[in-house]
Amino acid sequence: MDIGTATLAVGGVIGLVLALFGVRMLLTGRAPASTSRNFLRVRDAALYHLLFGVALLLMAVGQMALRGLAAVVLSAAAIVLMGVALVRFRPRRGRPTADG
């Protein structure tokens, strides 16, 4: 395994961890204090981490396992997910509010 493939694999693992963290926050409705301070709502924090994690995972899989048009399409989908996460659910300083 060369350094590029190893870097993609680490990125994929980080994406998986972020996605699972986002799912956990969505299911429990709670976030760690350090995360809550940076988002207005727990739902925003959860979706930010979920979308960003899935995007990293898609990017890694697309670059490691696929070739040609399939890799390009998966990378484009990952970029769109990252864009949605960064624009719609970006961290904002403020007092956390209860979801609902």
Image: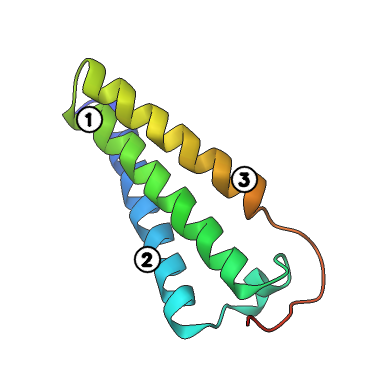
Q: Is residue 100 left or right of residue 19?
A: right
The residue singled out by tag 3 in the image is 86
The location of residue 49, given as percent across then percent down, is 50, 58
Q: Secondary structure at mark 1?
A: helix
Between the residue at mark 3 and the residue at mark 2, the CA separation in whole angstroms equals: 18 Å
Residue 84 lies, with reference to residue 31, above or below; the image says: above
Name, please, the residue furthest toward the front.
100
Between the residue at mark 1 and the residue at mark 2, the CA separation in whole angstroms equals: 21 Å
Identity of the residue drawn at 41% across and 37% down: 78
- Residue 5 visible to the viewer: no
Mark identifier at residue 64? 1
Instruction: Please identify, in this view, whether the residue under mark 3 or under mark 2 is nearer the observer.
Output: 3
The location of residue 74, given as percent across then percent down, is 31, 31
- Amino acid on which disc 3 is placed: Leu
- Amino acid on which disc 1 is placed: Met
Q: Is residue 20 left or right of residue 44?
A: left
The residue singled out by tag 2 in the image is 20
- Mark 3 neighbour density, 10 Å: few (under 14) some (14–19) many (20 or more): some
Q: Is residue 74 left or right of residue 27?
A: left
- Amino acid on which disc 2 is placed: Leu
